[in-house]
Amino acid sequence: MSSINKGGASDVASRLAFFKGLQTVTNRIHATENIDEIMFELSTDICSLFAADRLTIYVVDESKTTISSRVKTGLHSIRTIRLPIAENSVAGYVALTGQMLNIHDAYDEQELKAISMRMEFRKEVDERTGYRCHQMLVAPIASAETGDVLGVIQLINTRSGEVFSAIAEEGIQGLGQTLAVAFAQRRHALVQPKSKYEGLVNDAKLTSAELEAATSLAREQGLSLEALLLEQYKLKPVDIGSAISRFFGVPYEPFRADRVKPLDLLRNLKRDYVQQAQWLPLEENPEGLLTLVTDPEQAIASRVVQNVFPKATPVFCVTTQVEFMQTVAQFFGGSAADDASVSELLSDMQEDDGEGNPIAEDVSAAADNELVKLVNRIIIDAHRQGASDIHIEPRPGKEKTQIRFRRDGSLTPYIEVPSSYRNPIVTRIKIMCDLDISERRKPQDGKIKFRRFGPLDIELRVATVPTTGGLEDVVMRLLANSEPLPLDKLGLLEGNYDRLRQTIAKPYGIFFVCGPTG
C-alpha cells in the first residue's frame, strides 16, 4: 500500500485499507510465540504495509542500559545488534525519551543535531553492505499501563523516496502498542534460558519434573542428558536442537546426509581432534566460515577456530551431540583404535630445529593424531600406575619436556617429549579442559572429563602456571569417579564405627566430613 507515502493520507479508501492491513498484522502478532518469530516471519508483511524497505525491532535488555535486536544476516547466521540507550543513536534516543522520530534523511547531520546535539547516524553498516539509509520512522514500544519502554520499532526507507506520512506515523504508534502487549505476554521468551534444555519445558516437550528426573538419572547412570532424553524420553534431535539454539542464541543445524565434504577446510584437521574439540567447519560462504559446534560459547571463548583459520570470520551454528558425531563420521569415516604404546607414539613424533611454535602452529600440532593419542596414553598410564598427579614441565631451548608422575607422594620420571612439542602438548591439554589457549601469562584452572576422550571414567583437575621464557607448567590431578563407600567399608575400628552411627543418627547438629582434596 505505497499510497500512504504518496500524499494519500486524506484518501478514505486508502486509510481504511491501511488500517485493515494493520489489523491483520496485529492478529498475527498475537498468534506468534516469541519476538524472533515476529522479526523473521512478519517482517516482510509489516514492510509491505508501510511501504518500507526494512524493519528492525529492538528489545530493552534486562540491564535497561542497552537495546538489542537479532538480525538474520543469511541463511545460517543471525547477528545480534546492541545499542546503548542514549542520545547518540536514533533508536537509542527513542528508547531513552519514549518519543517517536520521523527522519527525512539519516545522513543530514543538521536534521539529527536539531533533535539532539549528541545524535549521529552510524554509517559502518551502510559502508559494509552498500545499502544506504535515508528515511527512518522510529517509535517506542511502551507499556500502556506503566509507560515503561520495552523496545523500539524502526522502519527504514520508503519505497517512494518521500518522508513517512502522517498515516504511517499513526500506524507505527498503534503497532508499538500491539508489540508492547505481545512483549508483556511473552516476557519469558525474552529471558535467556537458565539451562540448555529449559526450552524443552517451554515447548511442552517435557514437564519440569520430567526434566529434573532425567537430569538426576543421567547423573546416576553416568550418561549424557541428551542421550537419555533421546533414548528413554523418545525426543527427537530437532526438539533438543531447538532448545539449545534458543539457549546459545545461534541457529540450529540438523544433520544433513547430502552435505558435501569440504576437503579444502578439512585438509589440516584430524578426526580425533575435531571429535574431541567439538567444532567442525562446514563451508565457507559470503557470511564467513560456517562452523558446526555443540557449545558456541566454548568455541568463541577459546578462539580455537580463529587460530586454525586466522583469515576467516567464524559463523557458528549449534547442533546436538548425536548429530555432530554423525557429521564427523560423514566427513572422516571411522577412527583407528588408540592402542599404541607411549614409546611407539614418541618414535612417530620427530624433533625439529625450531625454538618453539606460534599459537597457530601450536593448535595445528595439537590437532595431530599422534599427539592426541600421546596425551591420552599419558593419562591412561598415570591412572593404571596409581599416580595421583601428572606434572608437565617444559624446559627452555632445545631441552626436552619432562613428564613426571606423583605416586605415594613422590615424583618419578615418566617420559621426555621433544622440545618442538612442548607448546602443542600444553595447548592440547588446554583444549581438553576448555581453557584459553592464547593466554600464556596468567595461571589458569580447569578440569577434564576424560570419558569424552578415552576409555576411562575419570576426572582431572588441571592447573597451568607460567614459568620463565614464556613457557607453562601443567599439573593434572586424577580424581576417580568411584561409587561412594558404605560406612562399614571405611576401615573404622568397631568402637569408632558405633560412635559414628550414633552421632549421625541424631536429628540435630552438624556432621563434618573432612579430608584431602579428591
Image (spheres, rainbow, N blue to C red):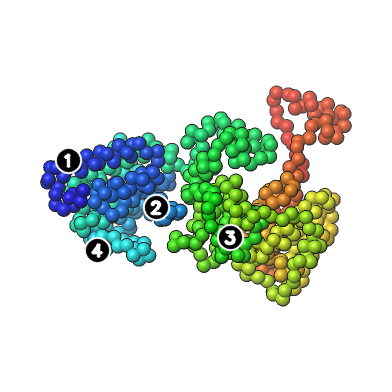
Crowding near pointer 2: few (<14 within 10 Å), some, many (20+)? some
Q: Where is mark 4, residue-wise?
A: 108
Q: CA distance from mark 4 to mark 1?
A: 34 Å
Give x and y (percent) for residue 398: 75, 73
Tell me the residue at 52%/67% (across/down). 311
Q: Are marks 2 and 3 in contact (CB under 8 Å)?
A: no
Give x and y (percent) for residue 28: 32, 39
The amino acid pointed to by label 1 is Leu
**Disc on res. 71:** 2
- Residue 438 is left or right of residue 490, and the answer is left
The amino acid pointed to by label 4 is Asp
Give x and y (percent) for residue 485: 78, 35
Q: Where is mark 1, residue-wise?
A: 16
**Label 4 residue SS:** loop
Q: Quadrant of residue 509?
A: top right
**Disc on res. 304:** 3
**Label 2 residue SS:** strand
Q: CA distance from mark 3 to mark 4?
A: 43 Å
Tell me the residue at 16%/53% (across/down). 6
Looking at the image, tell me whether mark 1 or mark 3 is earlier in sequence order. Answer: 1
The amino acid pointed to by label 3 is Val
